[in-house]
Amino acid sequence: MASYMDIINATMQYQKTSLERRGGHGQGTQGISFETILSQSMDPWKIEGTVSPAVSQSPISPAELEDELKFKECLKFVLGQEGNKFVSDDGGKESSRYGILQSTAKYLGYKGDVKNITRPEVEKLYKKIWDKSGAKGLDLPMALVHFDTFVNSPASARKLLKKSEGNLENYIKSREQRYTRLAEARPEAYGKYLKGWKNRINSLKNVVAQYNKQNIMAAAGAYGVRGSGKLA
């Protein structure tokens, strides 16, 4: 999976080659695109369903590429949690598949039965949800936490993001507390979902911990720290 650090490293390299080109010190870098640098920074290209920029048919800006990478990474987590099974009575309301309710699919422009929806069609619907969520403007891993929350409850996601004031730990804690309150207030309706909700929260915490570890290792490398991989 391409990480946010891949994007950062590729952006830095792209800026470096651009400066060299303008200064006349790197004629050999002329014509090298951001997409090419990013694709070379990952070995191999591992974003499922994404066409490598090196063979892309149409040009894509660095900002668009960054958004696509963030979306793909966040979507992989969401679909890993939701699965692809058809559920005839999701939450006792209606049918769903890939975590998308029939009414949500219809609202987003899908005209068929979600029972028959394909993976590419699902990705298109989730991309619309991503655009509505505002996760595009957030850095990872906050973008992941907010997008996953938005998939679960758009209204709650907006409230939790505002309440958190950008603090990731507070955001996750508030979401977990919301689940507990729902289960306690209406155990007959939500009690059976509490364990699954908490497992999802724990999965998010694990992903956030992995990102934090990556950032620490990247910072250690930038400052020349060796051996333990930890900052002195």
Image (cartoon, rainbow, N blue to C red):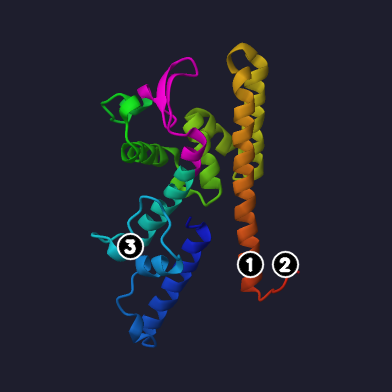
**Closer to us: 13 or 217:** 217
Find out whether the residues at labels 2 and 1 contact each other: C-beta distance under 8 Å. yes
- Estimate the x, y position of residue 186 in percent, counting from the top left: 62, 14
Query: Judging from the image, what secondary structure is the residue with disc 1 in?
Result: helix
What residue lies at 50% left-to-right and 43% top-to-bottom? Answer: 77
Q: Can residue 18 be spotted in the picture?
A: yes
Classify 227 as above or below 135.
below
Give the magenta-colored segment's residue range: 77-103
Q: Which residue is mark 1?
A: 219
Q: Which residue is mark 3?
A: 53
Q: Residue 116 occupies which quadrant of the picture?
A: top left
Q: Residue 221 occupies which quadrant of the picture?
A: bottom right
Q: Earlier in the sequence, mark 3 or mark 2?
A: 3
**Closer to us: 162 or 66:** 66
Mark in front: 3 vs 2: 3
- Estimate the x, y position of residue 152 in percent, counting from the top left: 50, 30
- Asked whether 98 falls inside the magenta stretch, the response is yes
Mark in front: 1 vs 3: 3
Q: Earlier in the sequence, mark 1 or mark 3?
A: 3
Classify 87 as above or below 45.
above
For this orientation, the residue located farthest to the right is: 232
